Image (tube, coloured by chain):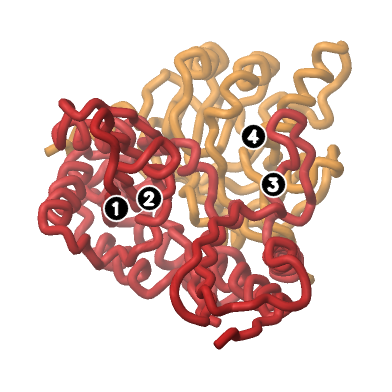
Chain colours: A orange, B red
Amino acid sequence: MDSHILTPITAEVTKDLHAGDYVYISGTIYVARDAAHKRFMDVLDQGEELPFPIKDAAIYYMGPSPAREGRPIGSAGPTTASRMDKYAPRLLDLGQKAMIGKGKRTQEVIEAIVRNQAVYFAAVGGAGALLSKCIKKSELVCYGDLGAEAVLRLEVENFPVIVVVDAEGNDLYKTAAQAYIR
Amino acid sequence: MIRTISTEEITANIREMCIEANHYLSLDMGKALKEAADAEQSPLGKKILCQLEENLVIAGDEMIPICQDTGMAVVFVEVGQEVHFQGGVLEDAINEGVCQGYRDGFLRKSVVGDPILRENTNDNTPAVIHYSLVAGDQVKLTLAPKGFGSENMSRVFMLKPADGIQGVKRAILTAVEDAGPNACPPMVVGVGIGGTFEKCALLAKQALLRPVDGYSQIPYIRELEEEMLQAINQLGIGPGGLGGTITALAVNINTYPTHIAGLPVAVNICCHVNRHVVREI
Protein backbone atom coordinates (compact mmCIF):
# COMPACT_ATOMS: atom_id res chain seq x y z
CA MET A 1 0.00 0.00 0.00
CA ASP A 2 1.28 3.49 -0.82
CA SER A 3 1.11 6.08 1.93
CA HIS A 4 2.40 9.55 2.80
CA ILE A 5 3.81 10.23 6.25
CA LEU A 6 5.13 13.30 8.04
CA THR A 7 7.97 13.51 10.54
CA PRO A 8 8.38 13.11 13.44
CA ILE A 9 7.65 9.42 12.96
CA THR A 10 5.89 8.33 16.15
CA ALA A 11 4.71 4.90 17.27
CA GLU A 12 1.26 6.01 16.10
CA VAL A 13 2.69 6.22 12.58
CA THR A 14 4.80 3.06 12.66
CA LYS A 15 1.95 0.83 13.85
CA ASP A 16 0.22 1.34 10.48
CA LEU A 17 3.32 0.58 8.39
CA HIS A 18 3.84 -2.93 7.08
CA ALA A 19 6.78 -4.62 5.38
CA GLY A 20 6.40 -4.06 1.63
CA ASP A 21 4.54 -0.73 1.92
CA TYR A 22 5.69 2.06 -0.38
CA VAL A 23 5.94 5.25 1.69
CA TYR A 24 6.65 8.91 0.88
CA ILE A 25 8.24 10.82 3.77
CA SER A 26 7.97 14.60 4.16
CA GLY A 27 9.55 16.68 6.91
CA THR A 28 12.84 16.66 8.78
CA ILE A 29 15.26 13.75 8.72
CA TYR A 30 18.83 13.50 9.98
CA VAL A 31 21.82 12.14 8.09
CA ALA A 32 24.53 10.07 9.78
CA ARG A 33 26.73 7.15 8.81
CA ASP A 34 29.61 5.13 10.27
CA ALA A 35 31.96 7.78 11.61
CA ALA A 36 29.15 9.94 13.05
CA HIS A 37 27.54 6.93 14.76
CA LYS A 38 30.87 6.10 16.35
CA ARG A 39 30.97 9.63 17.78
CA PHE A 40 27.37 9.35 19.00
CA MET A 41 28.45 6.35 21.07
CA ASP A 42 31.39 8.30 22.52
CA VAL A 43 29.06 11.19 23.40
CA LEU A 44 26.63 8.83 25.13
CA ASP A 45 29.45 7.02 26.95
CA GLN A 46 30.53 10.36 28.37
CA GLY A 47 26.99 11.04 29.58
CA GLU A 48 26.49 13.95 27.19
CA GLU A 49 23.58 14.87 24.92
CA LEU A 50 23.35 13.76 21.29
CA PRO A 51 23.65 16.63 18.78
CA PHE A 52 19.95 16.44 17.78
CA PRO A 53 16.74 15.30 19.49
CA ILE A 54 16.72 11.54 19.09
CA LYS A 55 13.10 10.96 20.21
CA ASP A 56 10.98 9.98 17.18
CA ALA A 57 13.85 10.92 14.87
CA ALA A 58 14.50 9.39 11.46
CA ILE A 59 18.16 8.80 10.56
CA TYR A 60 19.13 8.45 6.93
CA TYR A 61 22.33 6.43 6.42
CA MET A 62 23.89 8.51 3.68
CA GLY A 63 26.98 10.42 2.65
CA PRO A 64 26.17 12.86 -0.17
CA SER A 65 28.38 14.07 -2.96
CA PRO A 66 29.14 17.82 -2.74
CA ALA A 67 26.37 20.23 -3.80
CA ARG A 68 26.83 22.28 -6.94
CA GLU A 69 26.15 25.99 -6.56
CA GLY A 70 22.49 26.82 -6.01
CA ARG A 71 21.55 23.28 -5.03
CA PRO A 72 20.84 21.99 -1.52
CA ILE A 73 22.81 18.76 -1.93
CA GLY A 74 24.57 16.53 -4.44
CA SER A 75 23.77 12.88 -5.18
CA ALA A 76 22.13 11.43 -2.07
CA GLY A 77 21.26 7.72 -2.10
CA PRO A 78 21.38 5.28 0.83
CA THR A 79 24.47 3.49 2.09
CA THR A 80 24.61 -0.08 3.44
CA ALA A 81 22.81 -0.13 6.79
CA SER A 82 24.58 -3.18 8.23
CA ARG A 83 27.60 -1.03 9.04
CA MET A 84 25.41 0.78 11.58
CA ASP A 85 24.04 -2.44 13.13
CA LYS A 86 26.49 -2.23 16.01
CA TYR A 87 25.13 1.21 16.99
CA ALA A 88 21.46 1.15 16.01
CA PRO A 89 19.90 -0.73 18.98
CA ARG A 90 21.26 1.79 21.48
CA LEU A 91 19.80 4.73 19.51
CA LEU A 92 16.46 2.95 19.03
CA ASP A 93 16.30 2.35 22.78
CA LEU A 94 16.77 6.11 23.24
CA GLY A 95 13.75 6.83 21.08
CA GLN A 96 14.90 6.90 17.44
CA LYS A 97 11.95 5.61 15.43
CA ALA A 98 13.09 5.28 11.82
CA MET A 99 16.19 4.21 9.92
CA ILE A 100 16.59 4.70 6.18
CA GLY A 101 19.28 2.74 4.35
CA LYS A 102 19.67 -0.36 2.25
CA GLY A 103 20.58 -3.96 2.90
CA LYS A 104 20.11 -6.59 5.58
CA ARG A 105 20.01 -5.94 9.33
CA THR A 106 21.04 -8.21 12.20
CA GLN A 107 18.61 -9.99 14.49
CA GLU A 108 19.68 -7.62 17.29
CA VAL A 109 18.54 -4.63 15.24
CA ILE A 110 15.25 -6.30 14.32
CA GLU A 111 14.60 -7.07 17.99
CA ALA A 112 15.32 -3.45 18.88
CA ILE A 113 12.88 -2.34 16.17
CA VAL A 114 10.12 -4.49 17.68
CA ARG A 115 10.98 -3.48 21.27
CA ASN A 116 10.70 0.21 20.36
CA GLN A 117 7.90 0.13 17.76
CA ALA A 118 10.35 1.47 15.20
CA VAL A 119 10.75 0.92 11.45
CA TYR A 120 13.52 0.26 8.93
CA PHE A 121 13.00 1.70 5.48
CA ALA A 122 15.03 1.02 2.33
CA ALA A 123 15.60 3.73 -0.24
CA VAL A 124 16.63 2.63 -3.73
CA GLY A 125 20.39 2.05 -3.75
CA GLY A 126 22.20 3.76 -6.60
CA ALA A 127 19.42 6.26 -7.32
CA GLY A 128 21.23 9.17 -5.69
CA ALA A 129 20.46 11.71 -8.41
CA LEU A 130 16.73 10.91 -8.35
CA LEU A 131 16.53 10.93 -4.53
CA SER A 132 18.38 14.27 -4.33
CA LYS A 133 15.42 15.91 -6.07
CA CYS A 134 13.26 15.19 -2.98
CA ILE A 135 15.70 17.01 -0.69
CA LYS A 136 14.71 20.67 -0.45
CA LYS A 137 17.13 21.86 2.20
CA SER A 138 20.29 20.57 3.84
CA GLU A 139 22.17 22.04 6.79
CA LEU A 140 25.13 20.93 8.84
CA VAL A 141 24.31 19.82 12.38
CA CYS A 142 27.82 18.87 13.51
CA TYR A 143 31.06 16.97 12.79
CA GLY A 144 31.86 19.05 9.70
CA ASP A 145 35.41 17.71 9.94
CA LEU A 146 34.09 14.33 8.77
CA GLY A 147 33.37 15.74 5.30
CA ALA A 148 30.92 13.45 3.51
CA GLU A 149 30.25 11.74 6.85
CA ALA A 150 29.06 14.87 8.69
CA VAL A 151 25.68 14.96 10.43
CA LEU A 152 23.08 16.87 8.40
CA ARG A 153 19.50 17.97 8.91
CA LEU A 154 17.43 17.57 5.73
CA GLU A 155 14.03 18.86 4.76
CA VAL A 156 12.50 16.29 2.41
CA GLU A 157 9.33 16.22 0.34
CA ASN A 158 7.77 12.95 -0.74
CA PHE A 159 11.03 11.07 -0.21
CA PRO A 160 10.29 7.53 -1.52
CA VAL A 161 11.10 4.53 0.67
CA ILE A 162 9.92 0.97 1.15
CA VAL A 163 9.17 -0.57 4.55
CA VAL A 164 11.62 -3.47 4.96
CA VAL A 165 11.31 -4.22 8.70
CA ASP A 166 8.07 -3.14 10.36
CA ALA A 167 7.28 -2.69 14.05
CA GLU A 168 6.16 -6.32 14.27
CA GLY A 169 9.53 -7.52 13.03
CA ASN A 170 8.44 -8.67 9.57
CA ASP A 171 11.48 -8.52 7.27
CA LEU A 172 10.77 -7.99 3.57
CA TYR A 173 14.28 -9.12 2.59
CA LYS A 174 13.52 -12.55 4.07
CA THR A 175 10.13 -12.94 2.41
CA ALA A 176 10.24 -10.99 -0.88
CA ALA A 177 12.44 -13.44 -2.78
CA GLN A 178 10.15 -16.42 -2.05
CA ALA A 179 7.61 -15.53 -4.75
CA TYR A 180 10.31 -15.29 -7.42
CA ILE A 181 12.56 -18.25 -6.65
CA ARG A 182 12.42 -20.47 -9.70
CA MET B 1 60.13 5.06 -33.17
CA ILE B 2 59.76 6.46 -29.68
CA ARG B 3 56.63 8.56 -29.17
CA THR B 4 56.65 11.19 -26.46
CA ILE B 5 53.50 11.81 -24.41
CA SER B 6 53.26 14.58 -21.87
CA THR B 7 52.12 13.56 -18.40
CA GLU B 8 49.99 16.72 -18.37
CA GLU B 9 47.91 15.13 -21.11
CA ILE B 10 47.41 12.09 -18.88
CA THR B 11 46.27 14.32 -16.00
CA ALA B 12 43.81 16.23 -18.21
CA ASN B 13 42.31 13.00 -19.55
CA ILE B 14 41.97 11.33 -16.14
CA ARG B 15 40.28 14.48 -14.79
CA GLU B 16 37.66 14.41 -17.54
CA MET B 17 37.21 10.64 -17.30
CA CYS B 18 36.41 10.85 -13.56
CA ILE B 19 33.63 13.34 -14.26
CA GLU B 20 32.31 11.47 -17.30
CA ALA B 21 32.25 8.06 -15.60
CA ASN B 22 30.26 9.36 -12.63
CA HIS B 23 27.52 11.01 -14.72
CA TYR B 24 27.06 8.74 -17.74
CA LEU B 25 27.01 4.96 -18.03
CA SER B 26 28.19 3.17 -21.17
CA LEU B 27 25.51 2.49 -23.80
CA ASP B 28 25.46 -1.26 -23.11
CA MET B 29 24.62 -0.61 -19.44
CA GLY B 30 21.77 1.74 -20.35
CA LYS B 31 20.40 -0.82 -22.78
CA ALA B 32 20.68 -3.64 -20.21
CA LEU B 33 18.76 -1.62 -17.61
CA LYS B 34 16.00 -0.86 -20.08
CA GLU B 35 15.69 -4.53 -21.07
CA ALA B 36 15.66 -5.47 -17.39
CA ALA B 37 12.78 -3.06 -16.69
CA ASP B 38 10.80 -4.63 -19.54
CA ALA B 39 11.50 -8.19 -18.40
CA GLU B 40 11.09 -7.85 -14.62
CA GLN B 41 8.02 -9.70 -13.34
CA SER B 42 7.71 -8.14 -9.88
CA PRO B 43 5.69 -4.88 -9.98
CA LEU B 44 7.88 -3.33 -7.24
CA GLY B 45 11.00 -4.56 -9.03
CA LYS B 46 9.80 -2.98 -12.26
CA LYS B 47 9.11 0.29 -10.46
CA ILE B 48 12.64 0.30 -9.02
CA LEU B 49 14.21 -0.41 -12.42
CA CYS B 50 12.22 2.44 -13.97
CA GLN B 51 13.49 4.71 -11.20
CA LEU B 52 17.05 3.66 -12.00
CA GLU B 53 16.49 4.60 -15.64
CA GLU B 54 15.05 7.96 -14.57
CA ASN B 55 18.03 8.39 -12.25
CA LEU B 56 20.41 8.01 -15.20
CA VAL B 57 18.56 10.68 -17.15
CA ILE B 58 18.63 13.14 -14.22
CA ALA B 59 22.32 12.42 -13.62
CA GLY B 60 23.30 13.26 -17.19
CA ASP B 61 20.93 16.19 -17.71
CA GLU B 62 21.58 17.94 -14.41
CA MET B 63 25.13 16.80 -13.72
CA ILE B 64 24.32 15.08 -10.44
CA PRO B 65 26.45 11.94 -9.92
CA ILE B 66 24.52 8.73 -10.70
CA CYS B 67 25.38 7.50 -7.19
CA GLN B 68 26.66 9.49 -4.22
CA ASP B 69 29.35 6.84 -3.77
CA THR B 70 31.53 8.12 -6.58
CA GLY B 71 33.95 5.39 -5.69
CA MET B 72 37.64 4.78 -5.32
CA ALA B 73 39.26 5.44 -8.70
CA VAL B 74 40.60 2.23 -10.23
CA VAL B 75 42.81 2.95 -13.24
CA PHE B 76 44.14 0.47 -15.77
CA VAL B 77 47.05 1.85 -17.79
CA GLU B 78 48.24 -0.03 -20.83
CA VAL B 79 51.47 1.56 -21.99
CA GLY B 80 52.87 0.89 -25.45
CA GLN B 81 56.54 -0.08 -25.29
CA GLU B 82 57.42 2.74 -27.72
CA VAL B 83 56.05 5.42 -25.41
CA HIS B 84 58.21 7.87 -23.49
CA PHE B 85 56.55 10.02 -20.82
CA GLN B 86 57.71 13.58 -20.42
CA GLY B 87 56.93 16.09 -17.71
CA GLY B 88 56.85 14.12 -14.50
CA VAL B 89 56.12 10.79 -12.85
CA LEU B 90 53.18 8.93 -14.45
CA GLU B 91 51.68 7.88 -11.12
CA ASP B 92 51.67 11.48 -9.86
CA ALA B 93 50.02 12.60 -13.10
CA ILE B 94 47.23 10.04 -12.68
CA ASN B 95 46.62 10.98 -9.05
CA GLU B 96 46.60 14.67 -9.98
CA GLY B 97 43.92 13.89 -12.58
CA VAL B 98 41.83 12.08 -9.94
CA CYS B 99 42.28 15.00 -7.52
CA GLN B 100 41.17 17.55 -10.13
CA GLY B 101 38.30 15.42 -11.43
CA TYR B 102 36.82 14.77 -8.00
CA ARG B 103 37.22 18.43 -7.00
CA ASP B 104 35.94 20.04 -10.22
CA GLY B 105 33.21 17.44 -10.79
CA PHE B 106 31.69 17.81 -7.30
CA LEU B 107 32.35 14.13 -6.68
CA ARG B 108 32.48 12.64 -3.20
CA LYS B 109 35.89 12.17 -1.60
CA SER B 110 35.65 8.66 -0.22
CA VAL B 111 39.28 7.66 0.37
CA VAL B 112 40.96 7.40 3.78
CA GLY B 113 44.74 7.57 3.90
CA ASP B 114 45.15 4.64 6.27
CA PRO B 115 42.78 1.67 6.62
CA ILE B 116 42.90 1.71 10.43
CA LEU B 117 43.50 5.38 11.29
CA ARG B 118 40.89 6.39 8.68
CA GLU B 119 41.56 10.04 8.00
CA ASN B 120 40.03 11.24 4.71
CA THR B 121 42.62 12.36 2.15
CA ASN B 122 40.04 14.95 0.97
CA ASP B 123 40.90 14.62 -2.72
CA ASN B 124 39.96 10.97 -3.35
CA THR B 125 43.59 10.01 -3.97
CA PRO B 126 45.41 7.75 -4.22
CA ALA B 127 43.88 5.83 -7.11
CA VAL B 128 44.39 2.07 -7.38
CA ILE B 129 46.52 1.77 -10.51
CA HIS B 130 47.26 -1.33 -12.58
CA TYR B 131 49.96 -0.97 -15.24
CA SER B 132 50.75 -3.23 -18.13
CA LEU B 133 53.26 -2.93 -20.95
CA VAL B 134 51.93 -3.71 -24.41
CA ALA B 135 53.12 -3.44 -28.00
CA GLY B 136 52.84 -0.14 -29.87
CA ASP B 137 53.13 3.58 -29.20
CA GLN B 138 49.78 4.32 -27.59
CA VAL B 139 48.52 4.61 -24.04
CA LYS B 140 45.13 3.13 -23.17
CA LEU B 141 43.55 4.48 -20.01
CA THR B 142 40.55 2.78 -18.37
CA LEU B 143 39.00 4.51 -15.40
CA ALA B 144 36.52 2.57 -13.26
CA PRO B 145 35.29 4.32 -10.10
CA LYS B 146 34.30 1.50 -7.72
CA GLY B 147 31.66 1.93 -5.05
CA PHE B 148 32.03 -0.09 -1.89
CA GLY B 149 28.46 -1.27 -1.29
CA SER B 150 29.17 -3.96 -3.84
CA GLU B 151 32.97 -4.11 -3.41
CA ASN B 152 32.41 -5.17 0.21
CA MET B 153 30.39 -8.16 -0.95
CA SER B 154 33.11 -9.49 -3.29
CA ARG B 155 34.94 -12.72 -2.50
CA VAL B 156 37.98 -14.87 -3.30
CA PHE B 157 37.63 -18.66 -3.04
CA MET B 158 40.75 -20.83 -3.19
CA LEU B 159 39.07 -24.00 -4.47
CA LYS B 160 40.66 -27.40 -5.00
CA PRO B 161 41.08 -28.77 -8.54
CA ALA B 162 38.66 -31.57 -7.57
CA ASP B 163 35.94 -28.97 -6.94
CA GLY B 164 35.88 -28.40 -10.70
CA ILE B 165 33.26 -26.40 -12.53
CA GLN B 166 30.58 -27.36 -9.97
CA GLY B 167 32.70 -25.72 -7.28
CA VAL B 168 33.02 -22.59 -9.41
CA LYS B 169 29.24 -22.43 -9.86
CA ARG B 170 28.68 -22.84 -6.11
CA ALA B 171 31.22 -20.09 -5.37
CA ILE B 172 29.51 -17.63 -7.73
CA LEU B 173 26.03 -18.35 -6.35
CA THR B 174 27.28 -18.18 -2.74
CA ALA B 175 28.82 -14.75 -3.30
CA VAL B 176 25.71 -13.39 -5.01
CA GLU B 177 23.32 -14.84 -2.43
CA ASP B 178 25.36 -13.48 0.47
CA ALA B 179 25.51 -10.08 -1.23
CA GLY B 180 21.73 -9.94 -1.67
CA PRO B 181 20.32 -6.44 -1.20
CA ASN B 182 23.59 -4.99 0.12
CA ALA B 183 25.23 -4.89 -3.30
CA CYS B 184 22.43 -2.79 -4.86
CA PRO B 185 21.03 -5.30 -7.34
CA PRO B 186 20.59 -5.63 -10.25
CA MET B 187 24.31 -6.34 -10.23
CA VAL B 188 26.99 -7.07 -12.75
CA VAL B 189 29.02 -10.08 -11.67
CA GLY B 190 32.69 -10.18 -12.64
CA VAL B 191 34.36 -13.57 -12.18
CA GLY B 192 38.03 -14.49 -12.40
CA ILE B 193 39.03 -18.13 -12.60
CA GLY B 194 42.65 -19.32 -12.43
CA GLY B 195 45.99 -17.60 -11.94
CA THR B 196 47.06 -17.01 -8.35
CA PHE B 197 45.35 -15.47 -5.32
CA GLU B 198 45.80 -11.88 -6.55
CA LYS B 199 45.56 -12.68 -10.27
CA CYS B 200 42.03 -14.10 -10.02
CA ALA B 201 40.88 -10.96 -8.19
CA LEU B 202 42.32 -8.81 -10.96
CA LEU B 203 40.67 -11.02 -13.62
CA ALA B 204 37.33 -10.53 -11.88
CA LYS B 205 37.79 -6.75 -11.82
CA GLN B 206 38.73 -6.76 -15.51
CA ALA B 207 35.67 -8.89 -16.29
CA LEU B 208 33.49 -6.02 -14.98
CA LEU B 209 34.99 -3.78 -17.67
CA ARG B 210 33.72 -5.98 -20.49
CA PRO B 211 30.44 -4.94 -22.20
CA VAL B 212 27.43 -6.50 -20.50
CA ASP B 213 26.01 -7.52 -23.89
CA GLY B 214 29.17 -9.38 -24.92
CA TYR B 215 30.41 -12.84 -24.04
CA SER B 216 33.56 -14.88 -23.53
CA GLN B 217 35.39 -16.13 -26.63
CA ILE B 218 35.86 -19.51 -24.95
CA PRO B 219 32.78 -21.62 -25.82
CA TYR B 220 32.39 -23.43 -22.48
CA ILE B 221 32.96 -20.19 -20.53
CA ARG B 222 30.30 -18.46 -22.63
CA GLU B 223 27.92 -21.27 -21.68
CA LEU B 224 28.90 -20.87 -18.04
CA GLU B 225 28.22 -17.11 -18.22
CA GLU B 226 24.76 -17.75 -19.60
CA GLU B 227 23.99 -20.55 -17.15
CA MET B 228 25.12 -18.48 -14.16
CA LEU B 229 23.10 -15.43 -15.23
CA GLN B 230 20.02 -17.60 -15.42
CA ALA B 231 20.75 -19.29 -12.07
CA ILE B 232 21.34 -15.94 -10.34
CA ASN B 233 18.09 -14.55 -11.70
CA GLN B 234 16.29 -17.60 -10.32
CA LEU B 235 17.41 -16.72 -6.76
CA GLY B 236 14.52 -14.24 -6.53
CA ILE B 237 16.60 -11.44 -4.92
CA GLY B 238 15.42 -8.92 -7.52
CA PRO B 239 15.95 -5.16 -7.93
CA GLY B 240 16.91 -3.55 -4.63
CA GLY B 241 16.81 -7.03 -3.07
CA LEU B 242 13.05 -6.61 -2.73
CA GLY B 243 12.12 -9.66 -4.79
CA GLY B 244 12.04 -10.22 -8.51
CA THR B 245 13.34 -11.98 -11.56
CA ILE B 246 16.22 -9.62 -12.40
CA THR B 247 19.03 -9.90 -9.86
CA ALA B 248 21.95 -9.59 -12.30
CA LEU B 249 22.32 -7.86 -15.65
CA ALA B 250 25.32 -9.93 -16.72
CA VAL B 251 27.92 -12.44 -15.60
CA ASN B 252 31.31 -11.86 -17.20
CA ILE B 253 34.00 -14.48 -16.65
CA ASN B 254 37.73 -14.14 -17.40
CA THR B 255 40.16 -17.05 -17.06
CA TYR B 256 43.93 -17.58 -16.84
CA PRO B 257 46.24 -20.60 -16.56
CA THR B 258 46.80 -21.77 -12.99
CA HIS B 259 48.89 -24.15 -10.84
CA ILE B 260 48.42 -27.94 -10.83
CA ALA B 261 47.32 -27.74 -7.18
CA GLY B 262 44.83 -24.90 -7.36
CA LEU B 263 41.57 -23.46 -8.64
CA PRO B 264 41.33 -19.83 -7.52
CA VAL B 265 37.96 -18.14 -8.11
CA ALA B 266 37.21 -14.47 -7.47
CA VAL B 267 33.77 -12.91 -7.64
CA ASN B 268 33.85 -9.12 -7.93
CA ILE B 269 30.35 -7.77 -7.61
CA CYS B 270 29.36 -4.42 -9.05
CA CYS B 271 26.03 -2.68 -8.58
CA HIS B 272 23.98 -1.47 -11.55
CA VAL B 273 26.18 1.65 -11.58
CA ASN B 274 28.93 -0.23 -13.40
CA ARG B 275 31.07 2.75 -14.40
CA HIS B 276 34.02 2.71 -16.75
CA VAL B 277 35.44 5.04 -19.35
CA VAL B 278 38.19 4.13 -21.83
CA ARG B 279 40.44 6.51 -23.78
CA GLU B 280 43.36 5.91 -26.06
CA ILE B 281 46.07 8.50 -26.33
Nearest-to-viewer mark from 2 and 4: 2
Q: Chain of mark 4?
A: A
Question: How far across and how far down the image is residue A111, in percent?
Answer: 49, 13
Q: Chain of mark 1?
A: B
Three-letter code for the amino acid on which mark 1 is drawn: Asn
For the point 84% across and 19% down, which residue is it?
A43
- Asked if the residue under mark 1 is in contact with the one under mark 2, i.e. CB atoms within 8 Å, the reply is yes
Among numbered discs 3 and 1, the one appearing first in the sequence: 3
Three-letter code for the amino acid on which mark 3 is drawn: Val
For the point 55% across and 82% down, which residue is it?
B281
Asked whether the residues under marks 2 and 3 belong to the same chain, the reply is yes
Q: Residues within 10 Å of mark 2 (few under 14, many from 20)?
A: many
For the point 69% across and 61% down, which residue is it?
B91
Asked whether the residues under marks 4 and 3 belong to the same chain, the reply is no
Question: How far across and how far down the image is residue A90, in percent?
Answer: 66, 15
Disc marking residue B111: 3
Question: How far across and how far down the image is residue B214, in percent?
Answer: 24, 67
Residue marked by disc 2:
B203
